Amino acid sequence: MTASDARYRWAQATVIALLCAPLAILAWDFVREIRQPGVAFGPDPAETIVRYLGEWAIRILLATLAVSPVARLLGRPRLVRYRRTFGLAAFSYAVVHFTGYLVLLAGLDAGTFLADFVERPYITVGLAALVLLVPLAVTSTRRWQRRLARNWRRLHRLVYAIGVLACIHLLWLSKGDYMDAALYGGILALLLGERLARYTKRLRERGVHET
Amino acid sequence: MRSAPIRPSEITPEHVYLSRRRFIAGGAALTLGGVGAHALSEDWLTGRGFRPGAPIEGEDTTPIEYATAYNNFYEFGTDKDDPARYAHEMTVDPWSVEVAGEVAKPGKLGIEDLLANVDLEERVYRLRCVEAWSMVIPWIGFPVKALLDRFEPTGAAKFVEFTTLHRPDEMRGQRSFFSGIDWPYVEALRLDEAYHPLAILAVGMYGNVLPNQNGAPLRLVVPWKYGFKSIKSIVRIRLTRRRPGTTWNMLQPREYGFYANVNPTVDHPRWSQASERRLPSTLFSPNRIETRMFNGYEEVASLYADMDLRRNY
């Protein structure tokens, strides 16, 4: 193992630890709440927990989208190696967020969930984002990357749509105040805009070469 | 975490907080949770006294630490713990209320003058929020009619409009760039609704004056309607011929009706109103109960005898 390999492993471990921190805080609050109800999550623990997990899912999803632009910006392309970790963390938070909704808010009641799914567009949209994340999580391994070759990139462009769906989910949840939706939506627009700008630039350059 | 309610010790000076703990333990008289000056002092209320009310049979009164720390008062922010955190920035002393519009004797009175002749009583009411959670709160107040009569509404008066304080310097939610709300907050009732004996103006809760986060010094409580109708920190009351525009109704007319009567058969477009979570709920029990028509106050049904409540939601 070279020195750079060791450094990479340490860095990777640190990134994983940081991404787990919000979950660890939640677990600790869970223990406090069980010991003395109301202490950690207030009078409405279900809402508090589900919202907390949802916020972290969207933050980490946006962080995932930010990895490659940041790597380019810093001129350190190898940073892209951490993107998979971020993406899997976003997926994990989304899964726990949805599970929290199912167990704590819907009370594991199929009727409540189905009614919500059909009638509440923000739940439909949120679930769509989660479902679309599944194939990306499954194909995140090197082996799948090799097997899908060029199609891997195409498939993983789904993450842009997922980001949009997640922001719509948040916007439709908002009541009277659009600060969070504007903040996360703004960051997403920036991240997607940067890619669009690069894409059109590439197209133009290619056009120049061909003539 | 950001959305977790803050501990009482963070919003209340320690001696007050400790004395509250003693109250909860011993059932003695307590010092209230809100910090900052009260337009109406505890002494004022002690001097006035109030007729105690009966608890709701079979339903626990919500513990005070939840009712004063979990609030929707968007003037101070949209998180449930924002009001408890920031409402002390609002000056409530001095406080006056203007009564205008279709009244024979309009005027602007200091809060103590305004309340000089009303008899205070305790009313333990369910509070059902449009967000599908509920609490049970012991208010101290008096029928809205008692106040309106003093200003002699004219025969032309059909509606009563209430307006909350607008003071961005002291109400950070009103300074927020991302707020969709056009301040000040306005609510209104039909005059016959306001005259119903269940509709009260509250000056206190849990045996003491209102904390700022609960709408000090004067708020409306209409127990058969969703909580957003029960406007807080009122500075202006206007009697009108025509139905006034009301804040949430103007913002999202499909989601928040003018009447906003608690009605389990008419869903909010984004969530069901058939049931509610009675707070505090716990980690392992959402404490979900069926929502009742008019929040269980069926005696108001006659106010809406000829109306289609699916359309007039």
Image: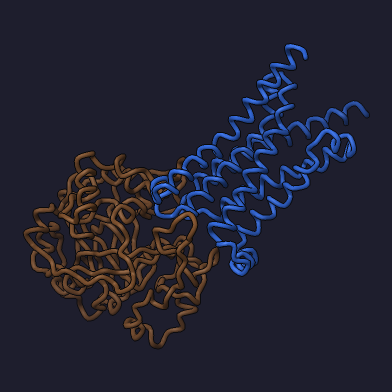
Residue furthest to the bottom: B306
Q: Is residue B119 left or right of residue A147?
A: left
Q: What tint does the image give chain B?
A: brown
Q: Residue drawn at (50%, 74%), measured in percent from left and top?
A: B266
Residue furthest to the left: B47
Instruction: Tally the numbered discs.
Output: 0
Q: The blue chain is which one?
A: A
Q: Percent from the top left, x then y, of residue A64? A: 67, 35
B266 or B13: nearer the eye? B13
Residue furthest to the right: A211
Q: Is residue A12 above or below residue A155?
A: above
Occupied quadrant, residue B168: top left
Q: Is residue A16 above or below residue B65?
A: above
Q: Residue drawn at (52%, 71%), measured in percent from left and top?
A: B267
Q: Quadrant of the C terminus of chain A?
A: top right
Occupied quadrant, residue A58: top right
Occupied quadrant, residue B297: bottom left
Residue furthest to the front: A35
Q: In this view, does B99 lie to the left or right of A89?
A: left
Q: Is residue B197 left or right of residue A29?
A: left
Q: Residue drawn at (29%, 41%), measured in percent from left and top?
A: B9
Q: Percent from the top left, x then y, of residue A44? A: 44, 55
Q: In which quarter of the image is the N terminus of chain A?
A: top right
B307 or B224: nearer the eye? B224
Q: Percent from the top left, x then y, of residue A95? A: 65, 48
